[in-house]
Amino acid sequence: MSQPATTEVPATTQPPMSIKLQGVTKRYGSNLILDNISLDVAPGETVALIGPSGGGKSTLLRCLNCLNTFEAGQIHVGPHILQPDSSGEVPGAVRQQVRRLLGMIFQDFQLFPHLTALQNVIEAPIQVLHRNPEEVRERGMKLLERVGLGARTHAYPHQLSGGQKQRVAIARALAMEPRGLLCDEITSALDPELKGEVLDVLEDLKREGMTLLMVTHEIGFARRAADRVVVLAGGKIVENGPPSQVIDAPQTERTKTFLSRVLG
Amino acid sequence: MTLHFRVLPRHDWRWLLWCAGLVLCLSTTHVSAQDDNKPLIWAADAEGGAPYIYKDPKDPNHNIGFEVDLAQALSRELGRPIVFKQYQFNSLVSGLLRGDFDLAMNGLEVTPDRRAKLLFSHPYYIFQQQLVVRADETRIKSFADCQKLSGITVGTLEDTAALRLLSHDQITTKIYDNQVEPYADLELGRIDAVLLDLPIAVSYAQPNDNLKFVGEPFAEGYYAIALRKDQRELVEKIDRALAKLIANGELQHIYEKWQIWNDEQDKLAHSSSLDVAAESQQLWTLSRYFPLLVDGAKTTVFISLLSMLLAIAIGLPIAMLRLYGPLPLRILATLYVEFFRGIPVLLLLYFLYYGLSGMAKAYGWGHWFDLQPFQAAILGFGLIYAAYESEIYRAGIGSIAPGQWEAAESLGMSKPLTFRRIILPQAMRIILPPMTNDFVALLKDTSVVSVIAVVELTKQYQMLSKSSMKYLEIGIATAALYLVMSVPLGYLSRYLEKRWNKQTLR
Ligand SMILES: Nc1ncnc2c1ncn2[C@@H]1O[C@H](COP(=O)(O)OP(=O)(O)OP(=O)(O)O)[C@@H](O)[C@H]1O
Ligand SMILES: [Mg+2]
């Protein structure tokens, strides 16, 4: 097992930035999925988003990355404001800028299967940012080294384990030099012994000052690494506070039932 | 059945046996009396076959022609009914050899190659070649001009005396498989002249004011009734009957009625003046026919490749429209696919080559629609295969997980960029194996382009085997060529499928 290295390439050279949701409301048909959500994430803060299935956690992250639209409210990402216009869409230019600032990592990795680990990492910087391919390659190698995959740069996704794939996905997001990462249950598809290698990478990024908003069912990890835990249930934030408070001394019934279920 | 027998009384059993015996008796007497009583089955092609035999324009249920009249007269002389059987002209010889009918009489020319396999009656008509050009033609005044002038293309039918003359003189030819189309193409200006047997020219060119005969008829040949070698007795009877019809002037009467009588026919009465086996038999060796087959194979590959490229160029946008287009375009694309998947290639080829240019002429659209045979073939196959391909592409592209789109989107990639760099390369892996299979199918499907006068591998096979009668030998060589083209592709398809299946597993 290669352990993620802790030194060299910083994931970003920019200062971290804040995320701020104001009254975000999202419906699917007549179903209210996000009900007037307001949430602040400070620069460099790590926020764990937990809650029962169907509570709207994924939907919230997807709104932040413009993979979903929403009906009302505003989302501030650094200096940019996401707000649906009259057609219900967020203007394309704003969308692009926000995506530059926030990388997203998916539960099922979604690596590009026809590209090697390194090609996965360098595809967007070359094609979207039109960076110098040589420099991008070099940085891509370093990012893969950083997530402990320096030896597998030329492996195709099907040749990698789940944990390795997820680390490639993190390197791929980092290659765009984001200032925050959105992680949607990124260890849920992994065997318990592989979860650790991915979570280590996240902790490493947190130490570096990356803003992290992560949906997780790893209560232990949330308690250890998160600055704040937010419980989302039925489209509402039912609890919001430091792990010691939310996890160890939950205030609402909703949180208590949820925690007793996941902690077994 | 058994139940039924069990309830029959005993004497009914005997009655049944008696019946069976009677039937047996009758059938054996029938076999022994076959020579005199059984109708003779005469095969010919009545499709567009004026003036030999063709459908009566006034009553299409009824065939007319000089050969119909001759058959009637022969039947009377032989004292035996002659029944007509419709048969493709191109297959008359092989059908006769196979025993599908008793005799072939359909303007079948006596050639040494045919004489080697068949038995011919005394000739019943002496034909000559007639050159036909457009009425406004000034360059060509005789057959010799076709040789002298450069860039002249002469149309004719396959496996004819005319074709042998033309290829002997190394004149560019275009080969058709029915008698209407060469004259139609001549009128359209696609070819410069048509050389065919005089009776055909009399029927199809003479009544047409846009065409004219040039030069005297030349190069004699003989039409005779073809039979199998084991039918010597019957041939002798037919010869006697023919001799009588020639002597009593009845044959002349028939030919005059059909306006094909000329002084040449006087020779029919004098066997000695007939030079029936003039030509020396050609040697049909592998080294002689194989290069011709290879030429055919090249044409097959050429048409298939270009058709496939066109199919890809049309099929991909159609698939994209069906997947991502706005509703009206999506409907149009669907209609395209349904239409071109639903019509036979043959119909489309006919329309593109003959129909379109006729319409262009009628409505004055100009030369844009006057397609060359190759263009029509490539366009026809391209349009139809585009429908098939688009369905393969649609399935392939649609099968890529939506998560791939989202992952690329979250990296800031635009939709077109994502399609080009992420979706299409993955879809290719799903698309290529069935596409390779389609290409193999296309290689074989192109064999129908002979209907618009393109000579590809199958057509070349038909022509060579018919002239040489070496159906099996040349057939094996042709099959080998097809296999050489298609089998490696099949392996490639399976190899790609295997290799990529592994890679696409996430
Ligand atoms: N495309 C969609 N169309 C309609 N309803 C949807 C759609 N996507 C999600 N939903 C609904 O929105 C609600 C919230 O879904 P979401 O995926 O955000 O939940 P989640 O909190 O991430 O749950 P989980 O823990 O199971 O991932 C669910 O009730 C789901 O059925
Ligand atoms: Mg979810």
Image (spheres, rainbow, N blue to C red):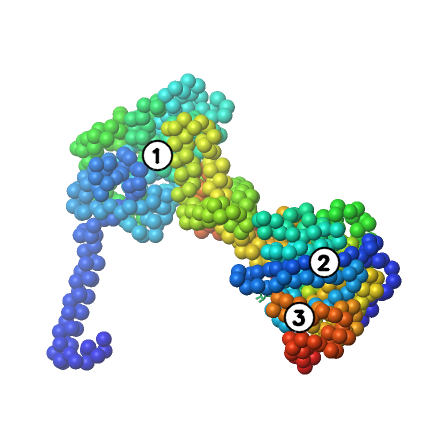
Tell me the distance, in whole angstroms, between the alpha carbons under discs 3 and 2.
17 Å
In the figure, is residue B414 to the left or right of B61?
Answer: right
Residue bearing mark 3: A238
In the figure, is residue A45 to the left or right of A237?
Answer: right
B390 shown above or below A225:
above
Residue occupying the far left of the picture: B11
Instruction: Return the residue nearer the eye: A200 or A57.
Output: A57
Dot 1 amino acid type: Val
Dot 3 amino acid type: Val
Where in the figure is residue B277, as x and y percent of width and height?
37, 36
At 23% across and 41% down in the image, what residue appears?
B60
Ligand 1, image quadrant it occupies: bottom right
Dot 2 amino acid type: Lys
Disc 1 on helix, strand or loop? helix
At 31% across and 51% down in the image, what residue appears?
B100
Residue A20: image tag = 2
Q: Residues within 10 Å of mark 1 (few under 14, many from 20)?
A: some
